Image: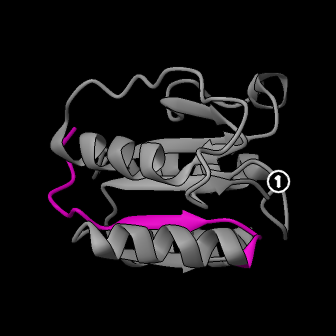
Amino acid sequence: MAVVSSSRVLIADGDATLRRRLYAALLEADIFSDCVSTTVDAMEHLHDRPYAVIVVDIGLPGGDIDRVVDSIGAIAQHQRPVVLVLAANAEAARTLDVEIVQIVLRKPVHLRQLVELIRSCIRGVDTRLAEPPEKGNGNGDHLTS
């Protein structure tokens, strides 16, 4: 399987504030991204262009998250994106295909940590992330949905 050459990120989350803040933070880090708010839009974007990293909320509106994961799996024969799933708890993500979903992050997630993790994924380094702190750091970068 070929590795994705694009460094573009797909952000798929129903929370408009989270999408805007993550988009802005990635742009500041010179990482380009596309944002979608439903599973239908996510699946359309997945077939339109390659992504190095896909950040998807397990509660993405508009359908079953497994449909998005299946779409990622279908394109994985041509590209190999890193898939980050945001979930309120680890139990919610237990049914996802572990061959496709590499990382599950428990919400809330710190914006700076998420940007660094995405940058690491793009570079292809170790993508394990320590458990996020329980509270924000006071800099307004604590993401929840």
Residue drawn at x 23%, y 48% is 122
Q: Is residue 14 magenta?
A: yes
Q: Amino acid at mark 1?
A: Gly
Could you say where residue 5 lies in the image, as x and y percent from the top left? 14, 58
Q: Label 1's element?
A: loop
Question: How is the structure coloured here?
Answer: one colour
Q: Can residue 32 be seen in this snapshot?
A: no
Bounds of the magenta segment: 1-16
Which quarter of the image is occupied by the C terminus? bottom right
Magenta run includes residue 126: no
Quadrant for the N terminus in the image: top left
Residue 29 drawn above or below residue 58 = below
Residue 94, position as x, y percentages in the image? 76, 22
Whether residue 102 sits left or right of residue 87 in the image: it is left
**Can you give x and y, in whole percent of width and height, for residue 39 in the image?**
72, 68
Q: Pointer 1: what residue?
A: 59
Identify the residue shown where x is 85% and y is 63%: 63
> Which residue lies at the image location 51% right of the left edge and 67% below the top edge?
22
Choose top left, top right, bottom left or bottom right for residue 3.
top left
- 60 w.r.t. 82: above or below: below
* 13 is higher (above) or lower (below) than 85: below
- Of all residues, the one furthest to the front in this rendering is 138
